[in-house]
Amino acid sequence: MRQGCTVERLLLIVGHNSKSGMSNMSILWALGGFFIVLTPVVLIHELGHFIAAKLSNIRVEEFGFGLPPRALKLAEKGGTIYSLNWIPLGGFVRPAGEDDPTIPGGFASASKRARLFVLSAGAGANFLAAIVIFWIALVLGPPAIAIGQVHEDSPAMKSGLMTDDVILEVNGTRTDNNGVLVQVVQENAGTPINLLILRNGEELMITLIPRQSGEYDAETDGPIGVTLKAAANGARISRGPVEAAIDSLGFMWDNISLYGRLPGMLLNGEISAQEARPVSVIGISQIAGMAAESSAMSRNLYPILTMAAFINIALGLTNLLPIPALDGGRITFVLIEAVRGRRVEPERESMVHIIGMLVLLGLMAFMIFQDIVNPIILPQ
């Protein structure tokens, strides 16, 4: 699959940090995550291309559910074959004349504007899906996070935190998952933080100072000295439709800007190379499986919906990179054509994309190998 996501971001969305494990994670959950999350995300991307091609009067020879070889021809309408294929990963669009501008009604013979529209529509569909999915997740609301155990002589105990206290906010940010709390605590070690909690129906503000690394045993304790659990009363931190729409756009921007900030974060030591490394379909399936398991155990769709929204953004952004064989690479050739006044010879462009695809396949194989021999999620 032509996409990559950073380890740290995926784990925080699910609600774990990169040091936590998947003690009961099984291959079945990973497979479930693959089919529930990754397959629909890729299909959404291809549907974006397909709809844009139809709107641009570009002839589409085949739209396939799954990847070839073909298992079944479902229908044929308007000159397009709709097929069901054996490899259950998203789908594909096969436009007429993809690389041959001599074919009337084909992709390559279409106007520059039409080609740009079709090429960018896949990512656009992913971005739109991310906003809608995350909006649904926010309206439904995540399960509230509660204190499971307070450790002796910890900052939590000294501040007065108690078992079953529900954490509503940390430093003014809603604790949509325990990853939000973990991130704020890690970023503010040695600095006071404010927790808005719910105790016996009453909201209280508690201030504590997370311990710095070396001030506690990381094997058995944490910076504030608590364990976390889902709130026993099934409380959710939900939003109204309008607020959820605003926050969905904010979620979109935060994740898009994250990719631009990553190089600086690496150079400044804010995250490690291990945390920022891209992951393959293996690693993403594991984390998506963890999100599916979390949703199943909590009977709450928020973890799996949030993960699906993030992967939609990641796939859309990755495909817009100006890399040969990706949508962004093809967009680059259209822009070059617009600047120079004539298109690059189809044979040369095709060769560039073939070389780019070979490089991407090699990189994909390396990432899969890395995720197998150096798993991103270690057992506890």
Image: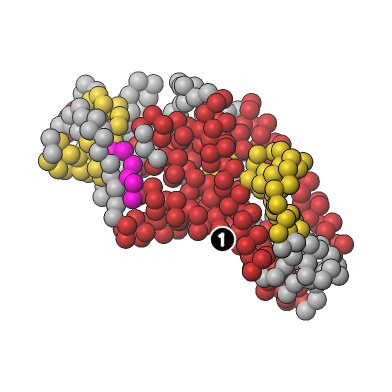
Q: Is residue 174 visible?
A: no
> The disc labelled 1 sits on which kind of residue?
Gly
Q: Is residue 168 left or right of residue 116?
A: left
Residue 231, compared with residue 263, is above or below; it is above
Q: Position of residue 70 (x, y in %)?
A: 76, 43
By what rule are the colours in the image chosen?
A: secondary structure
State the residue at coordinates (32%, 60%).
242
Relative to the observer, which residue lies in front, 327 or 48?
A: 48
Residue marked by disc 1: 124
Residue at 20%, 43% in the rendered image:
196
Question: Which quarter shows the C terminus?
Answer: top left
Q: Nearer the viewer, residue 71 or 240?
A: 71
Pick whichever, 343 or 275, lies toward us: 343
- The spot of residue 377 in percent (x, y) is 52, 29
Q: Is residue 238 visible?
A: yes
Badge 1 marks a residue whose secondary structure is helix
Give the residues in magenta: 139-144
Residue 301 lies in what quarter of the image?
top left
Residue drawn at (41%, 59%), measured in percent from left and top? 249
Relative to residue 57, is residue 144 drawn left or right?
Answer: left
In the image, is residue 355 part of the stretch drawn in magenta? no
Give how far across and how far down residue 87 sits, in percent: 70, 38
